[in-house]
Amino acid sequence: MGLSWRTIPDDMRAFIEAQKLFFVATAPTDGRVNLSPKGLDTLRVLDERTVAYLDLTGSGNETAAHVTENGRMTMMFCAFNGEPMTLRLYGKAELIRPDHAEWPQLRLLFPEFPGTRQIFRLAVDSVATSCGWSIPAVGEMRERDELIDWAKAKGEDGIEAYRLANNVVSIDGLPTGYVSDDF
């Protein structure tokens, strides 16, 4: 049923790029596992070993805390229509913020979104599929506007205040590395 590779095959790249929803899982060495759903036009397969996604301001910043601590990340993609399949990318992630030397070039790969916070780049060391036979087939998926509308309404100063209040430490008390001077 399942297959595995050390790099992203072309047909799996096409599957990844076709998904409107993906999931990102991280965990600290000691603490809670975090699993976040992601959407919008925020994912790019850079090459057969590298994937990046644009991270928008949200309720927390667990992924940043975990990646800062140990870099471990798993990304999961599920076929909610068409042939069933689940695909996972395993590897080490790097946190790229506006003060990072590569920010300008990576940022250009994504559309402009209010509340853009950071980019995570995953160095893939393993790719695996599983059957996905238990994943429900879902009708047409559509993108939601709520996060974008929320960020627009807050404005830059409101987003900054929100980040300082909610995105500086993880739920386990780990630092996320966010400081307002980065932005």
Image (cartoon, grey):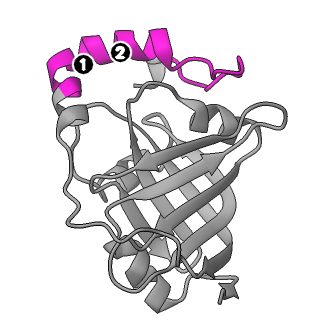
Q: Which mark is residue 27?
A: none
Residue in front for this viewpoint, 132 or 59: 132
Q: Is 75 drawn above or below residue 127 in the view shown?
A: above
Q: Quadrant of the N terminus?
A: bottom right
- Relative image position of residue 60 (x, y in whole percent): 50, 25
- Tell me the residue that label 1 is attached to: 156
The residues bearing labels 2 and 1 have C-alpha atoms spaced at a distance of 6 Å
Residue 156 part of the magenta-drawn span: yes
The residue lying furthest to the right in this view is 30
**Secondary structure category for the residue under label 1:** helix
Label 1, residues with CA under 10 Å away: few <14, some 14-19, many ≥20:
few
- Relative image position of residue 12 (x, y in whole percent): 48, 84
Name the amino acid type tagged 2. Answer: Glu
Residue in front for this viewpoint, 56 or 143: 143
Residue in front for this viewpoint, 19 or 84: 84
Q: Is 74 drawn above or below residue 174 in the view shown?
A: below
Residue 73 part of the magenta-drawn span: no
Circles 2, 1 touching at the beta carbon (< 8 Å): yes
Label 2, residues with CA under 10 Å away: few <14, some 14-19, many ≥20:
some
Residue 58, quarter of picture: top left
- Relative image position of residue 21 (x, y in whole percent): 37, 59
Q: Is 76 drawn above or below residue 9 in the view shown?
A: above
Q: Residue at x 50, y 20 (%)?
A: 167
Name the amino acid type tagged 1. Answer: Glu
Q: Residue at x 68, y 37 (%)?
A: 66
- Tell me the residue that label 2 is attached to: 160
Magenta span covers which residues?
150-179
Relative placement, left or right, of 108 versus 149 is right
Q: Quadrant of the C terminus?
A: top left
